[in-house]
């Protein structure tokens, strides 16, 4: 589904990502991990078009999307969440999710002005889709609450709901478990599994290593902008380069 070759990003004289390669197959949950400042979010920004690469290639469904605009990449089926809560605080949960439902169905100006049947049909479809996403993520009981009034766990789920409402083929989750308590983490992992079971592929950046090892099929590790390891979760846990990246010492020297 996603093929990245030689992805590199320079900011002035600093190389944030260097010759980074990664493939993601349809139906996988893949973890992208590394110490703080390793380049994980930069990779997300490059994939989704928030910043252009210095060099390298990104292909999605066999189509080169390198350097495309963010909205074009989203329309192709790659949608992301953010480290910080990204929603409109003074809108309800339902209103927030509806904002992203309009990425695909489009109404003309005259359709809206004259409240044409085609316009009403598209509006109803968007509402139905938003309600399905809200129910899917267990937010139906708070759908009419203002986003700013909800607990942190719910607010993180609103970000995921907004992303899902754009009907992604590939969902990029940037630290979705940040700030959650143990119960919220477990609930969110259940929802991520549901998302994958419903047909959406997931790329996950997360610092909660226990959760990463539990939910991911494969794990890619980046450090100082370079990929240093890739493999199954149990392989990554024993990898000396990964241990050194996180702890600064080899396992047998600790």
Image (cartoon, grey):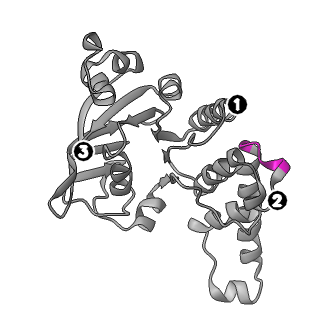
> Dot 1: what SS?
helix
Total count of labels: 3
Position in image of residue 204 (x %, y %): 46, 39
Q: Pointers 3 and 1 in contact (CB under 8 A)? A: no
Location of the N terminus (image quadrant) = top left
- Residue at x 59% of width, y 36% of height: 192
Location of the C terminus (image quadrant) = top left
Stretch of the chain drawn in magenta: 136-141
Position in image of residue 21 (x %, y %): 24, 40
Indicate which disc residue 225 carries: 3
Say whether residue 140 is magenta.
yes
Say whether residue 152 is magenta.
no
* Image: 76 above or below 237: below
Indicate which disc residue 183 carries: 1
> Dot 3: what SS?
loop
The residue under label 2 is: 145
Position in image of residue 104 (x %, y %): 57, 65
Locate residue 163 relative to residue 35 in the image: left or right.
right
């Amino acid at each position: 589904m996603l093929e990245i070759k030689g992805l590199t990003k320079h900011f002035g004289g600093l190389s944030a990502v260097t010759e980074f390669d990664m493939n993601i197959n349809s139906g996988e949950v893949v973890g992208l991990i590394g110490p703080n400042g390793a380049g994980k979010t930069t990779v997300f920004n490059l994939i989704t078009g928030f910043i252009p690469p210095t060099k390298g290639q990104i292909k999605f469904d066999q189509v080169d999307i390198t350097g495309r605009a963010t909205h074009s990449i989203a329309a192709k089926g790659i949608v992301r969440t953010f480290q910080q809560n990204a929603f409109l605080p003074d809108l309800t949960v339902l209103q927030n999710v509806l904002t992203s439902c309009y990425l695909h169905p489009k109404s003309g100006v005259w359709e809206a002005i004259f409240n044409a049947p085609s316009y009403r049909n598209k509006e109803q479809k968007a509402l139905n889709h938003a309600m399905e996403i809200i129910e899917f993520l267990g937010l139906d009981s708070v759908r009419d609450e203002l986003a700013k009034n909800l607990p942190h766990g719910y607010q993180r789920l609103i970000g995921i709901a907004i992303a899902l409402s754009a009907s992604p083929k590939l969902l990029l989750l940037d630290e979705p478990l940040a700030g959650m308590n143990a119960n919220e983490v477990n609930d969110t992992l259940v929802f991520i599994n549901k998302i994958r079971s419903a047909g959406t592929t997931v790329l996950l950046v997360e610092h909660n290593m226990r959760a990463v090892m539990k939910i991911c099929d494969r794990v890619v590790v980046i450090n100082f902008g370079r990929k240093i390891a890739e493999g199954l979760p149990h392989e990554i846990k024993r990898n000396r380069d990964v241990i050194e990246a996180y702890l600064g010492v080899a396992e047998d020297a600790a």
